[in-house]
Image: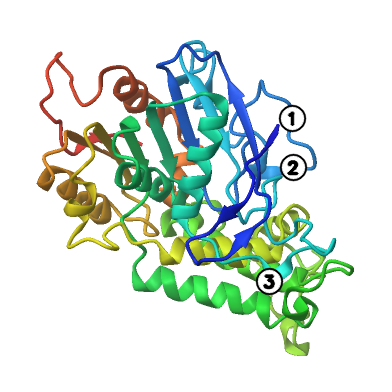
Amino acid sequence: MTVELGSFTFECGETVPELEVAYETYGEFDGNNAVLVCHALTGSQHVASGAREAEGTAGQARAWWDDVVGPGKAIDTNEYYVVCANVPGSCYGTTGPASEGPDGDPWGTDFPAVTVGDWTRAQRQLLDELGVGRLHAVVGGSVGGMNALDWAKRYPDDVRRVVAVATAARLDAQCLGLDAIARRAITTDPDWQNGDYYDGDGPTDGLALARQIGHLMYLSKDSMERKFGRRSAGRESARDRFPSDPAGGFFPYREVESYLDYNASQFTDRFDANSYLYLTRAMDDYDLANGYESDADALAAFTGETLVMSFTGDWHFTVEQSHALEAAFEDADIPVTHRVVDSDHGHDAFLVEPENVGPPLRSFLADGVSTDGGHAPVHNSLFPG
């Protein structure tokens, strides 16, 4: 489903004449049970099965949290009215670089710069259209967790509970650097053509490399060693994604290379290169404390409760960064609980370990930070992976 929100001015000061937002809903709204789910970087509005299949989507874009959202699941659609919206700048139905601009051609890089704050404001306008006022909860993982934190900062009276999963108040320097290299892989592809590639094949090699860099950020050393080791994929395996130097034929094409090449090819079939540029910049730019003295000051007006979840094998958004988030909520006198999941899956754990994500999420949505009917926070509980 899509809704037209009319003229929308981005935080950069530029305006689009019509912002269209693609969204899906699950369950029935009773006036008090709305849960907004914020998707990760390249996800979509199609968070779970049961809604109309998202046209032209595949991979992560298809029911990307289906083990967590649905009837009888952690975010129980028999109990909650779940809304998930594709963010501005993406390519799954919400207005972005690939959308038609005022001149009838795709916007390309003429599309305004996008921030996480723009995502939050667009979601607020969508919810207004749906008749949803105060949310029971906002839930997000990865950069979607930043989106959830922005709700606590920007609309502190509009949400009772915030769930920030595998996220942080801001990216660290290593992740900023890796994202910069990924973007350069796209913009140095000759087929990028300064973003005006929509009448041709586009920068598929650059986007594939960017995705491979990103994918490595989502995995842990232990999970990669267990899954691939140094095993060869076989000399007969095709290496048609990227050229190799002549001497390379002497050496094995390893399983890890084959895996990255396959996933990159799948990704380039479903995602827009300009959108990847826009969304990674939005993630890189986000800083919870922007405009305030500290993270705690940014959160001070929030009157609800918070669940922070982190994973021991995640080096993209670390346990330490979640500890810092927890401390910020504590400093602002906001009830908070931090669940640390013992996992070696890396950043992807929040997507692939529903058995560990689901129970604390279900409990928090029902009871907040309380475990005994009170409001005492429970800190740093360890869930085995």
Distance CA(mark 3)–CA(mark 1): 29 Å
Residue 325 in sight here: yes
- Image quadrant in which you'd find residue 156: top left
- Residue type at the position of mark 3: Thr
- Label disc, if present, on residue 53 of the rendered structure: 1
Residue 314 in percent (x, y) is at 37, 53
Crowd band around label 3 with a 10 angstrom C-alpha radius: few (<14), some (14–19), many (20+): some
The quarter in which the C terminus is drawn is top left
Q: Please say if 100 is above or below 377.
A: below
How far separated are the C-alphas under marks 3 and 2? 23 Å
Q: Is residue 217 left or right of residue 208?
A: left
Of the numbered discs 3 and 2, the one sitting upstream in the chain is 2
Provide the residue designation for mark 2. 57
Q: Which amino acid type is shown beneath numbered disc 2?
A: Thr
Q: Position of residue 189 (x, y in %)?
A: 73, 80
Determine whether, in the image, residue 150 is placed left or right of residue 240. Answer: left
Q: CA distance from mark 1 to mark 2?
A: 8 Å
Residue 109, numbered circle: 3
Residue under the image location 67 percent in, 75 percent down = 186
Most extreme residue toward the right is 199
What crowding class fits label 2: few (fewer than 14 Cα within 10 Å), some (14-19), or many (20 or more)?
some
Residue at image coords 45%, 35%: 353
Residue type of the residue flagged with mark 1: Glu
Residue 48 location, x and y as percent? Answer: 60, 28
- Between 85 and 319, the residue placed more toward the observer is 85
Q: In terms of sequence position, does the residue under pointer 3 or pointer 1 come before the other?
A: 1
